[in-house]
Image (tube, helix red, strand yellow):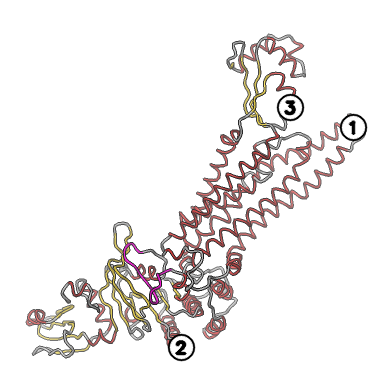
C-alpha cells in the first residue's frame, strides 16, 4: 500500500507553479524525509496530501486509494502543520479534550502518559508552554489519534537543538511502538539523516529524487581525482555534481551498475545523505527517480 | 475532494464524529465571546429591569390618580413623563447599535481568528472534517446570539410599554420598530452572519469586524431611510381627515400641501396664505381652524403614512428578509470554508 500516491499533481498560485507534475508513490512503513530549499513546494505537497489544499492538476490519494481530505483519509491521517498551530488560550487538558471531541478515535491514556513523561503540565495554557513543549503537545495530540500516517510539516524549524533532539527521539519511539508511517519535511537535512529511510527531494516545484535512502546511498559515490581528467570522466559517467578545488576534482556520480569500475587514477568514497541532497539541489536538471515512467527516463537519466 | 462535503460518508467510510461532541467544541472555543455578550446584554438588561420597575410603578400611580383629570393628576403625569421619558428616548437611540455590536463581536472572530493564526490547519485536518466543524459553529453561535437578542428585545418592550400606552410614541416609529418584535433579533442575526462571512472572506479579525460593521450599518440605514416605507403601499390622508386621526401611533414620514390648481405648493406659500388669516384662526389652538381656513381657500394638507395596524405585517416582512439574507450569508460562508485552500 502507498501512503501517498500522486499523479500529475500540480498546484498553481497565480502564475507561479508551487508544485508541478509530481508523480510520487510513497510506500507504507517508512519514515519519509521530504527535503528541499524554502519555496520548493514541500508545504504545498503536504497540504494537498492532507486535504487542506486542492490540486490545480492531477490527483493525490492516500492510504491505498482514499482521496486526500475524504472522511476516511482525515480519520487515519494526523497532520502537524508548520509551527504547530494550537489554541493558545486553552489549557493543555482542554486542548486534549477538544482534540478528543474532534475525532472518532482517541487514546486519552496515551496522551496523558506522554505529557506526564514530557513534564508538560495539564493545567497550563498552551500559549505559556515553550516552543519545544508546544511541538511535543502537537505531536502528542497527533499520536493519540492512533493514525496510520503521520504528516509533519517542518516540525523542527522553530526548535532549539536540544528540543529538536528530544522531538525526534519522541517521534522515533512512537514509530517503533506503533509502526506508523511518517512523512516529515525539513530544509535542514542533517536533522533527518539518522531517522529517515526514504528520501524525497523537491526543488523548484519538481520532484528531483525519490527513493529508499539505503538504495540511494548505495547507488551513488564520490570520485576524487585530477581535475584535468574530470571532463573525460564526466563524459563516461553519470555525474550529478562536480566541484573543483585546485587540481583536485570531486565528482558525485550515480552508479549505472551495481559494481561500477572506478576509473584509473580516481578514488571512490561512499556518499552521505546530506552530500547527496546538496549535490542534487545544486544540479536542478539532475533527477533520480524510480519506476518506468518518470522524468528521469524522459530526460535520459542523469545530466550534470 | 467532493467527499469532503458529503453529509454522510459512504458505507465503507468511518462513522462521522457525533454532533454532540462538536457542541462541546463550539462551547469551549467561544464561551468567552458568549460570556461577553451575556455580560453586555445582562448588564443593560438589569438596568432596563430596574428602570422598568420604577416606570411601571410610576405609571400605575399616574393612572390610578384620583380624581382623574384634575390639575394635581395632570401635574403628576407631567412630572412622571419628565422624570423618565427623556432618558428612555436616549436609551432607544443607544440600543440601535446593539445588534451590530453583539453580532459582529461573536461572528467576526469566529472564523477569522482561526484563519489569521493558522489554527484552521489544525482544526480542518481532524477526523470530523471541516464541514461538521464549521456547520456546528455557525448554527450554534447563530442561534445563541439570536435567542439572547430576542430575550433582550422582549425585556425592552416591557420596559418601554408605558410610553406606548400613553401614546408618546408609535410602534412603527423608526427608533422603536427595530428594537421590538422580531426585528431586533433579526438584525442581530444579520450582524453575526455578516461577521462570519467577512471573516471567511477577509481572513483577518479586525478588518473582518470593521467590514461587517460597515455593511450592517449601511443596510440598517438604507432600510429605515428608503426600504421600510415601501413594504406595503402607504395610505394617504388629506385635510380634516388628517387632523381627526392622530398620527401618534401611525408612521407618517411625508406631508405636503396642494394649492387651488391641485398642484403641490411650498411651505412658504402656506405661510403667506396663513398670514392673511384672521387673528381668531391664527391664534386658535384647534388645528381644525387652520385646516378649515386653508380648505376654504382651496389649500389641502396631505399625509403619507403607514397605519399602526400593519405593525406585525411589517415586522414579519423585515424579519423574513433579514433571516433569508442571513441564511444566504451563512451558506456562502460554509461554501467558502469548503473551498478555502490552506
Separation (CA) of disc 1 from disc 2: 90 Å
Question: Residue A32: x and y, percent?
Answer: 35, 80
> For mark 1, what is the residue?
B68
Q: Residue at x 64, y 49 (%)?
A: B185
Counting the numbered discs, the total is 3
Separation (CA) of disc 3 from disc 1: 22 Å
Q: Can you say whether B292 is above or below A251 in the image?
A: above
- Callout 3: few (<14), some (14-19), or many (20+) C-alpha neighbours within 10 Å? few
Question: Residue B312: x and y, percent?
Answer: 68, 40
Q: Are marks 1 and 2 in contact (CB under 8 Å)?
A: no
Q: Can you say whether B263 is above or below B139 in the image?
A: above
Q: Residue at x 89, y 38 (%)?
A: B64
Q: Can you say whether B214 is above or below A39 in the image?
A: above
* Chain for numbered disc 2: A
Q: Is residue B213 left or right of residue A50?
A: right
Q: Which mark is residue B246?
A: 3
Q: Residue at x 41, y 75 (%)?
A: A152
| The one of B22 and B122 positioned closer to us in this rendering | B22
- Callout 1: few (<14), some (14-19), or many (20+) C-alpha neighbours within 10 Å? few
Q: Is residue A147 left or right of residue A217?
A: right
Question: Residue A197: x and y, percent?
Answer: 33, 84
Label 1 vs label 2, nearer the camera: 2
- Callout 2: few (<14), some (14-19), or many (20+) C-alpha neighbours within 10 Å? few
Placement of the C terminus of chain B among the 4 image quadrants: bottom left
| The one of B39 and B265 positioned closer to us in this rendering | B265
Bounds of the magenta segment: A55-69
Label 3 vs label 1, nearer the camera: 3
Question: Residue A252: x and y, percent?
Answer: 18, 82
> For mark 2, what is the residue?
A177
- Of mark 3 and mark 1, the one earlier in the sequence is 1
Would residue A302 be counted in the magenta stretch? no
Amino acid at each position: 500500500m502507498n501512503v501517498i500516491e500522486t499523479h500529475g499533481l500540480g498546484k498553481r498560485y497565480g502564475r507561479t507553479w508551487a508544485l508541478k507534475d509530481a508523480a510520487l508513490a510513497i510506500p507504507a512503513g517508512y519514515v519519509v524525509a521530504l527535503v528541499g530549499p524554502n519555496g520548493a513546494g514541500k508545504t504545498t505537497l503536504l497540504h494537498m496530501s492532507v486535504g487542506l489544499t486542492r490540486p490545480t492538476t492531477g490527483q493525490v490519494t492516500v492510504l491505498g486509494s482514499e482521496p486526500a481530505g475524504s472522511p476516511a483519509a482525515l480519520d487515519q491521517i494526523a497532520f502537524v502543520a508548520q509551527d504547530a498551530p494550537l489554541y493558545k488560550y486553552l489549557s493543555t487538558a482542554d486542548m486534549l479534550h477538544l482534540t478528543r471531541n474532534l475525532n472518532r478515535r482517541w487514546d486519552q491514556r496515551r496522551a496523558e502518559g506522554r505529557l506526564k513523561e514530557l513534564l508538560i503540565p495539564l493545567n497550563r495554557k498552551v500559549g505559556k508552554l515553550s516552543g519545544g513543549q508546544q511541538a511535543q503537545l502537537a505531536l502528542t495530540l497527533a499520536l493519540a489519534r492512533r493514525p496510520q500516517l503521520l504528516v509533519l510539516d517542518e516540525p523542527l524549524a522553530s526548535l532549539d537543538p536540544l528540543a529538536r533532539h528530544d522531538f525526534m527521539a519522541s517521534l522515533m519511539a512512537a514509530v517503533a511502538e506503533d509502526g506508523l508511517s511518517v512523512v516529515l519535511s525539513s530544509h535542514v537535512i542533517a536533522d533527518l539523516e539518522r531517522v529517515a529511510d526514504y528520501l524525497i527531494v523537491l526543488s523548484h516545484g519538481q520532484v528531483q529524487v525519490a527513493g529508499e535512502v539505503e538504495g540511494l546511498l548505495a547507488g551513488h559515490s564520490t570520485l576524487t581525482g585530477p581535475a584535468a581528467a574530470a571532463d573525460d570522466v564526466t563524459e563516461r559517467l553519470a555525474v550529478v555534481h562536480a566541484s573543483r578545488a585546485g587540481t583536485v576534482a570531486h565528482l558525485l556520480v550515480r552508479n549505472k551498475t551495481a559494481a561500477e569500475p572506478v576509473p584509473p587514477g580516481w578514488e571512490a568514497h561512499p556518499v552521505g545523505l546530506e552530500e547527496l541532497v546538496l549535490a542534487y539541489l545544486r544540479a536542478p536538471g539532475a533527477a533520480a527517480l524510480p519506476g518506468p515512467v518518470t522524468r528521469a527516463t524522459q530526460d535520459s537519466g542523469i545530466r550534470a | 475532494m467532493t467527499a469532503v462535503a458529503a453529509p454522510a460518508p459512504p458505507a465503507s467510510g468511518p462513522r462521522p464524529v457525533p454532533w454532540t461532541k462538536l457542541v462541546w467544541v463550539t462551547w469551549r472555543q467561544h464561551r468567552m465571546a458568549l460570556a461577553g455578550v451575556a455580560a453586555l446584554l445582562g448588564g443593560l438588561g438589569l438596568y432596563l429591569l430596574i428602570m422598568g420597575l420604577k416606570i411601571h410603578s410610576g405609571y400605575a400611580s399616574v393612572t390610578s390618580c384620583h380624581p382623574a383629570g384634575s390639575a394635581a393628576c395632570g401635574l403628576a403625569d407631567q412630572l412622571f413623563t419628565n422624570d423618565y421619558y427623556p432618558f428612555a428616548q436616549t436609551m432607544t437611540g443607544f440600543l440601535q447599535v446593539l445588534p451590530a455590536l453583539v453580532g459582529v463581536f461573536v461572528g467576526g472572530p469566529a472564523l477569522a481568528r482561526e484563519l489569521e493564526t493558522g489554527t484552521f490547519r489544525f482544526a480542518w485536518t481532524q477526523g470530523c472534517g471541516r464541514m461538521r466543524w464549521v456547520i456546528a459553529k455557525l448554527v450554534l453561535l447563530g442561534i445563541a446570539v439570536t435567542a439572547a437578542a430576542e430575550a433582550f428585545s422582549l425585556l425592552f418592550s416591557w420596559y418601554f410599554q408605558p410610553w406606548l400606552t400613553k401614546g408618546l410614541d408609535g410602534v412603527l416609529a423608526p427608533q422603536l420598530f427595530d428594537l421590538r418584535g422580531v426585528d431586533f433579533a433579526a438584525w442581530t442575526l444579520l450582524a453575526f452572519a455578516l461577521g462570519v462571512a467577512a471573516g471567511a472572506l477577509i481572513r483577518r479579525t479586525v478588518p473582518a469586524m470593521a467590514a461587517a460593521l460597515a455593511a450592517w450599518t449601511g443596510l440598517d440605514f438604507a432600510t429605515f431611510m428608503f426600504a421600510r416605507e415601501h413594504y406595503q403601499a402607504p395610505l394617504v390622508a388629506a385635510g380634516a381627515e388628517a387632523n381627526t386621526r392622530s398620527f401618534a401611533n401611525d408612521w407618517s414620514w411625508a406631508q405636503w400641501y396642494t394649492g387651488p390648481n391641485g398642484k403641490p405648493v411650498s411651505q412658504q406659500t402656506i405661510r403667506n396664505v396663513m398670514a392673511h388669516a384672521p387673528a381668531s384662526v391664527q391664534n386658535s389652538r384647534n388645528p381644525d381652524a387652520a385646516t378649515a381656513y386653508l380648505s376654504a381657500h382651496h389649500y389641502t394638507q396631505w399625509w403619507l403614512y403607514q397605519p399602526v395596524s400593519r405593525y406585525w405585517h411589517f415586522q414579519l416582512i423585515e424579519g423574513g428578509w433579514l433571516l433569508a439574507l442571513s441564511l444566504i450569508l451563512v451558506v456562502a460562508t460554509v461554501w467558502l470554508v469548503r473551498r478555502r485552500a490552506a
